[in-house]
Image (cartoon, grey):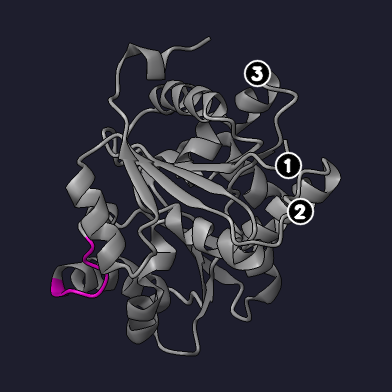
Amino acid sequence: MNKRPIGLFDSGIGGLSILREVQRLFPSEHLLYLADQAHVPYGSRGLEEVRQLSFGVVAYLLEQGAKLITVACNTASAASLHTLRERYPQVPFVGMEPAVKPAAANTQSATVGVLATPATFQGALFASVVERFAEGVTILQETLPGLVQQIEKGDVDGAATRAILEDGVLPLLDQGADTLVLACTHYPLIIPLLKDIVGEEVQIIDPSPAIARQVGRLLDQHDLHRTDPQAGSLSYITTGNLPTFKSSLEKLAFPIGDVLSAQWDEKLVRLS
């Protein structure tokens, strides 16, 4: 089991923000990343559809030998994480939770902006973290329509991407938000541009380091760390267009590794 890969998945390239942190903390681990670009973005889909897609992806990753699975997508976590843990009780899962807790603890204005997809805001997980951790704090929601698609194209600093951010984020600052929560794994990929827009005084909460640390805790808990000191392998699978995915990796300066394609068919979306 220790020699098997850590599986990670997202609807597209957003989960690479998580993969980068996991690789940085655990360079000897084999990593297998699946981008379900045949169905990107998940955030505009219904929760039940995302749940079924997640079941198919997880079954596929387990067939490839994944020893631990990171649901590197806020929407997929909101839709399916609880059910996945019930379905595969022997598999350690790490999921995404909107980082409202640290934001509420650190805001000085008692106003926090959360940047997420519509599906994430609709899920019970978001309502739960707000109820548990945001008492006395105003939570402002923003969905940033079109931003995921821009990032998928590799446009992390262009005029169109800047316009989407300015239209969505600046009104939050006008309402007093001094902290922004990135509750979509695509969004850490545009942090330099976001900082340029909001300035250094606005705190940006990137969950990627915390998620990577949770991966480490579960590796410890289940005695799954790879003990070989040599660097681990890095493999990608996309259900979408292979050249486009490779181009995105290059634009975002990610190591290419082994890149394969998977045909999306009934096998990948089966529920059992």
User: Which residue lies under the disc numbered 3?
Assistant: 87
Q: Earlier in the sequence, mark 2 or mark 3?
A: 3
Q: Residue furthest bottom?
A: 200
**Label 2 to label 1: alpha-carbon separation:** 8 Å
User: Which residue lies under the disc numbered 1?
Assistant: 2
* Residue depicted at x 57% and y 45%: 126
Whether residue 165 sits left or right of residue 27 in the image: it is left
Q: Which mark is residue 14?
A: none
Q: Amino acid at mark 2?
A: Thr
Q: SS class of the residue under badge 2? A: loop
Up/down of 67 relative to 259, above or below: above
* Residue depicted at x 84% and y 45%: 221
| Residue 260 in sight | yes
Q: SS class of the residue under badge 1? A: loop
Mark 2 and 3 residues: CB-CB less than 8 Å, in contact? no
User: Which residue lies under the disc numbered 2?
Assistant: 227
Mark 2 and 1 residues: CB-CB less than 8 Å, in contact? yes
Q: Which residues are magenta?
A: 154-159
**Picture coordinates of residue 32 (x, y %)?**
50, 44
Q: SS class of the residue under badge 3? A: helix
Q: Residue furthest left?
A: 159
Q: How many marks are shown on the rendered structure?
A: 3
